[in-house]
Image (tube, grey):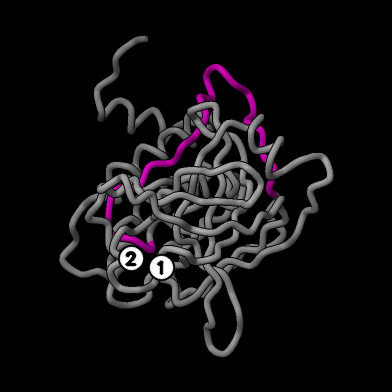
C-alpha cells in the first residue's frame, strides 16, 4: 500500500467523488475528532461543521444528519465506544443513535470497501430526522429520531459474578445463547440509567468489520409521557449462532423508534 501524508490524504479525500474513499475518510474523521476534549460541550457538532460542509459538497444529493449521513445511515450506526471514561454530556446534544451524543472516542465498525463491495444489512431505515437548533444544517440539533425496520429480540442483562471487570455484563435471550454486552457509556450503571437485570431490545443491524453481526441494544424510556427507545450499547456475535438461536427464518421484523 502506498503511503500518503495526512495532508495528502485529506486533500485527495475532499476532492474525490469515490463513495468508498469518502466513507473511509469520514470514519477516520469521526474517530480522530470524537475523542477530543472541547471547552464547551455544546460545540461538539458546530466545531465539526466546516469539515461536514466540505464533505457535503462532495456527497451530491446526500444529507448530513447529526454526524451521520442519510445515504449510509445503516453503516454509520455501526459505531462503538471503547473507552471506560466515556460520559454523557450534561445537556442534550444529539440523539442517542449518534456518536455525537457522547464524550469519548467512537469508531465505526465499517467493512473494508477495498475488498468487499457491500456488507450484509438486516435493518432498513424507514425514517430519520433531526430538529436543528439554528439555521446551520451541520450545526447544533435540539431533537432527533430514527425509525428502523429490523429483526428484534428482547433480552435481559445479567452479570457474571466471577468477573470483576467492565466485561462482566451479558445479554441472555432465553434461547440458549448469551452475548457479551458493550455499553456505550459505562457510567450508566453508576447513575442508575442501566441496571443489571434490565430488559432491553436488541436490533440486528448488520455485518461489521470483524465478520460478526452487530446488534444495537436499546432501553425503553418514558420521555415526555411517551414510551420511546434510546441506544445504550451494542454487541457483536457470529451470524450463524444468532440465526440458530435468536433470528431464525421465522423471525418477525418490527419497527422501532430510537431517539
Position of 253 with respect to 48 (left or right) is right
The residue pinned by badge 2 equals 189
Work out whether residue 179 or residue 185 is closer to the camera in this orientation and state it. Answer: 179
Q: Quadrant of the C terminus?
A: bottom right
Quarter of the image that includes the N terminus? top left
Q: Residue at x 25, y 69 (%)?
A: 41
Q: Does residue 140 show up?
A: yes
Structural distance between the alpha carbons of marks 1 and 2: 5 Å
The residue at which mark 1 appears reads as: 194
In the image: residue 26, left or right of residue 82: right
Residue 117 x, y percent position in the rendering = 63, 23
Q: Nearer the viewer, residue 194 or 5?
A: 194
Q: Residues within 10 Å of mark 1 (few under 14, many from 20)?
A: some
Disc number placed over residue 88 in the picture, else none: none
Q: Which element is circle 1 on?
A: loop
Give the SS element for disc 2. helix
**Cβ atoms at labels 1 and 2 below 8 Å apart:** yes
The magenta span reads 101-123
Mark 2 residue crowding within 10 angstroms, few (<14) / some (14–19) / many (20+): few
Is residue 34 a member of the stretch shown in magenta? no
Is-magenta flag for residue 122?
A: yes
Is residue 103 or residue 181 the one in the foreground? 181
- Considering only order in the chain, which callout, 2 or 1, is on the residue closer to the N terminus? 2
Q: Predominant secondary structure in magenta?
A: loop
Left or right: 69 as drawn, with respect to 246:
left
Residue under the image location 54 percent in, 36 percent down: 237
Coordinates of residue 119 in the picture (x, y in percent): 62, 31
Q: Decide if residue 61 is in sight here.
A: no
Amino acid at each position: 500500500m502506498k503511503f500518503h501524508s495526512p495532508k495528502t490524504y485529506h486533500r485527495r479525500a475532499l476532492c474525490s467523488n469515490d463513495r468508498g474513499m469518502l466513507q473511509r475518510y469520514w470514519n477516520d474523521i469521526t474517530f480522530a475528532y470524537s475523542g477530543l476534549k472541547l471547552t464547551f460541550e455544546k460545540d461538539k457538532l458546530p466545531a465539526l461543521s466546516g469539515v461536514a460542509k466540505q464533505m457535503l459538497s462532495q456527497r451530491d444529493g446526500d444529507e448530513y444528519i447529526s454526524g451521520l449521513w442519510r445515504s449510509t445511515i445503516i453503516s454509520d450506526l455501526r459505531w462503538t465506544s471503547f473507552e471506560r471514561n466515556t460520559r454523557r454530556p450534561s445537556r442534550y446534544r444529539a440523539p442517542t443513535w449518534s456518536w455525537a451524543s457522547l464524550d469519548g472516542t467512537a469508531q465505526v465498525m465499517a467493512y473494508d470497501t477495498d475488498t468487499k463491495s457491500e456488507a450484509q444489512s438486516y435493518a432498513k431505515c424507514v425514517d430519520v430526522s433531526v430538529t436543528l437548533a439554528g439555521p446551520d444544517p451541520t450545526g447544533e440539533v435540539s431533537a432527533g429520531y430514527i425509525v428502523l425496520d429490523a429483526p428484534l429480540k428482547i433480552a435481559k442483562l445479567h452479570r457474571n459474578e466471577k468477573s470483576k471487570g467492565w466485561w462482566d455484563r451479558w445479554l441472555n435471550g432465553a434461547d440458549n445463547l448469551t452475548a457479551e454486552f458493550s455499553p456505550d457509556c459505562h457510567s450508566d450503571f453508576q447513575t442508575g440509567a442501566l441496571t443489571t437485570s434490565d430488559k432491553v431490545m436488541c436490533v440486528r443491524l448488520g455485518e461489521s468489520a470483524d465478520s460478526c453481526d452487530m446488534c444495537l441494544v436499546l432501553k425503553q424510556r418514558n420521555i415526555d409521557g411517551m414510551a420511546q427507545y434510546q441506544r445504550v450499547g451494542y454487541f457483536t456475535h457470529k451470524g450463524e449462532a444468532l440465526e440458530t438461536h435468536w433470528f431464525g427464518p421465522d423471525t418477525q421484523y418490527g419497527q422501532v423508534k430510537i431517539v
